[in-house]
Image (tube, rainbow, N blue to C red):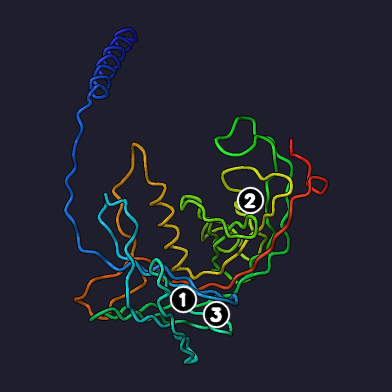
Amino acid sequence: MVIQNIFKSLVYSLVLLSTLMSLMSCEDVIDLKTANGPSQMVVDGWITNQPGAQTIRLTWSADYFDNGAAKPVLNAEVTVTDNLGNKYEFPYSGADGKYVWNGADTLGHIGRTYTLSIKNGDDTYTAFNQIKRVPTVDSVVYQHETYPFEPDKGPKKGFIAEFYARDFVGEGDTYWIKPVVSGKVSANNPVNISIAYDAAFGSGAPSDGLIFILPLRQSITVDSLYSAGNSVGVELHSITNEAFEFLKLVREQASNGGLFATPNSNIKSNVVNTNANGPKALGYFGASAVSRKETVIDPAKARPEED
């Protein structure tokens, strides 16, 4: 009986292998014809409590296979109003759909609620957000590291950087962790978006009021190791729970690929057309308080490599 079962398994494996080989040998090109949907306004705006210009970018969505540059939304009226009645005008800058506020004071303040209004033709879009508290980044440290393999990018030997900060006491604080390299916030692939719920990855973890866990602290080292003399750091942005869920979906969609990929779909926006029968918007309007810390890598001050 055992031999018979082995024989049956062998026959099944050969049939399966033959089927897979026949499928792999198929080289017919399938030309997918997709319907062209209507363009939708895409909002990319994130105000902060940092001094200086604040930018909200408005573009039009494109067809799935259109690889051209996004078309800007022109001549819209863009304003942001806080819960104290202060109104901030965002005139069009004349470049890439960017509407920029260049006031002398600071726009964002912790604890205030902000309302975005976009008037474009017969449509008026609105969105709401609040600037939440953000902890101070205590330090940025680094240690020697040697990869056991040849990496696709960067050196095999270098430094891993990490930051230290402590979450506030009180459950439900959420954050967006952004690497800073050579004085600039690193524009990483959406796959590398690093977000935290309290001091861990998500709700339910016993992490309230604690120091951020190690994988989050080291998430400012992206793609490759740093070298001696590199200026590295972190920006810690406070975000709402709604923004946390939005960014999580963005990361999931960006990493959605391979054999078991599922069809992508538009992520729900917090920007709403006041005309219920009008076209819907895409994108997100966010607001953050920012805590920032930077350092320059000095090999003499680096932690030793861990065994």
For label 1, the SS is: strand
Asked whether the beta carbons under mark 3 and mark 2 sit within 8 Å of each other, the answer is no
Q: Which mark is residue 100?
A: 1
- Label 3 vs label 1, nearer the camera: 1
**For residue 240, above or below residue 299:** below
What amino acid is found at the position of numbered circle 2 in the picture? Gln
Q: Residue at x 71, y 57 (%)?
A: 140
Name the quarter where the N terminus is drawn. top left
What amino acid is found at the position of numbered circle 3 in the picture? Gly
Whichever of callouts 3 and 1 sits on the residue coming sooner in the sequence is 1
- The residues bearing labels 1 and 2 have C-alpha atoms spaced at a distance of 33 Å
Query: How many C-alpha atoms fall within 10 Å of the one at disc 2: few (<14), some, or many (≥20)?
Result: some
Q: Report which residue position mark 3 lands on.
A: 108
For label 2, the SS is: helix
Taking depth in this image into account, of 168 and 257 the one nearest to the observer is 257
Would you identify the image quadrant in which residue 40 lies? bottom left
Left of 257 or right of it: where is 208?
Answer: right
Would you identify the image quadrant in which residue 146 lies? top right
Q: Residue at x 53, y 75 (%)?
A: 53
Query: How many C-alpha atoms fall within 10 Å of the one at disc 3: few (<14), some, or many (≥20)?
Result: many
- The residues bearing labels 3 and 1 have C-alpha atoms spaced at a distance of 14 Å
For label 3, the SS is: loop
Q: Residue at x 19, y 42 (%)?
A: 32
Image spot of residue 139 (x, y percent): 73, 60
